[in-house]
Structures are given as C-alpha cells and as structure tokens.
Amino acid sequence: MDHGDPLRLTPLQGRRLLLGVAGGIAAYKIAGLASTLVQAGADVTVAMSEAAMRFVTPLTFESITGRAVYTDIWGPLDRADPQHVRLVREIDLVLLAPCTMDLLGRLAGGLAGDPLTLLAAVVDRRRQPTLLAPSMNEVMWNQPAVQRNVEQLRRDGFVVIEPTEGWHACRTGGPGRLPEPEALVDAILERLPAR
C-alpha cells in the first residue's frame, strides 16, 4: 500500500487507536488498515463482533497488532476494571469499520450487548472521536431507516465517514462501499485529538 510521504503518518506515532470490526465482507480491508497504523507507530487494539469473525479471524489482527483481540464481553479480566472500560480509557480515537446496517441500528438505538456497541457506549466522544465507516450495498444504504440512524448518530456525536461509490460483493455498484484504507487513515489523521 503506497502512502506517499511517510512524514504524513508521523502524527500516528504512539497514538492509541481502537478498531471495531463488524461483520461485513469489507472487514478484510481493516486488516490492511491495522497493518498501516501499526507500521506508522500507532498502538492498535482491535475489537470484533461475532459476525466479523466469520470474515476475518482474531488471529489475523493479533498477528498484525501484537495485542489480544476483544471478542467477548464476558471474557476474563486481568485487572480490577472491566475490560471495556479499561480499553476505552486508554485510547485516543475509535474507528468502527465496516459499520454495517445492523451495527448502525444498534448504535442508534443505544444498545450495548456485544463488544462493539459496549465499547461505543463507554467512549467519551467529546475527547475521544468515534468514527463510523458504513459499508453496505446501495439498496441498504438508501433505506430510510439507515439514513435516520446515520443522522441520529451524528447528533449523538459520532463522526460518519461517507461511503464511496463502487463495486460491491453482491455484484452491484453504487454508493455504500467502504472507503479504501488510505482514506480511512486520512479520516483518522484529521480527527486525532491534540496531544
């Protein structure tokens, strides 16, 4: 992956990022994104939904990041703080991608019953930007419920990265495609809080 000027990625050095991966075919792109972020010096932690693990394994992200992957809200704790609270307390920025139609709906409804929604529920979005990168086909993206959820999430303080147009796994084209990793890096750089 060509990133042009390597100095462009310098602001990522030592930054603590949380990537939340949901269950969509575009999840494979997030492995490449995680690799880019780690190579730029970021400390990357990954959380995955159960559906995401059908597309990419936790071992992939553990190998890339050198860190355990958060996949179970009921998993063992290695400190007194609950895992989700500790993970969020230690990060600078959250990116949930691919953000599926289902995840958008659960976030907009304030649900917190899986690793991704639980982490999003304990983020202080005033100081820890939480970016959502929707990914779904054009028909799903244009559903009134999806557009209502996106607007609600913006009002709730989430940053929505607009999907791009292009080819989808369902062999159709149009809006709803997850932006390429380079564009996601740009969105992260743009929203990183000052040190």
Image: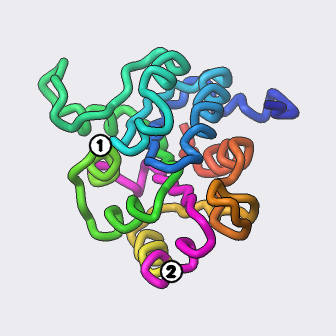
Q: For mark 2, give the secondary structure.
A: loop
Left or right: 2, with 136 as reference point? right
Q: Is residue 45 above or below residue 192?
A: above
Q: Position of residue 14 (x, y in %)?
A: 55, 24
Q: For mark 1, give the secondary structure.
A: helix
Q: Position of residue 186 (x, y in %)?
A: 70, 47
The residue sitting at 37% across, 20% down in the picture is 68
Q: How many labels does the image show?
A: 2
Q: How crowded is mark 1: few (under 14 residues within 10 Å), some or many (20 or more)?
A: many
What residue is shown with label 2? 143
Q: Which amino acid does label 1 sit on?
A: Pro
In the image, 10 versus 64, the foreground residue is 64
Q: Is residue 36 above or below residue 153?
A: above
Q: Is residue 8 above or below residue 103?
A: above
Left or right: 56, with 26 as reference point? left
Placement of the C terminus among the 4 image quadrants: top right
Left or right: 182, with 97 as reference point? right
Is residue 182 located in the magenta-colored stretch of the structure?
Answer: no
Q: How far apart are marks 1 and 2 (CA)?
A: 26 Å
Point out the stretch of residues depicted in magenta.
Answer: 122-146
In the image, 19 versus 16, the foreground residue is 19
Q: Where is residue 143 in the image (x, y as percent from the top left)?
A: 50, 80
The residue sitting at 56% across, 72% down in the picture is 141
The residue sitting at 48% across, 15% down in the picture is 66
Q: Is residue 29 above or below residue 170?
A: above
What residue is shown with label 1? 115
In the image as oriented, which residue stretches furthest toward the right? Answer: 4
In the image as oriented, which residue stretches furthest toward the bottom? Answer: 144
Q: How crowded is mark 2: few (under 14 residues within 10 Å), some or many (20 or more)?
A: few
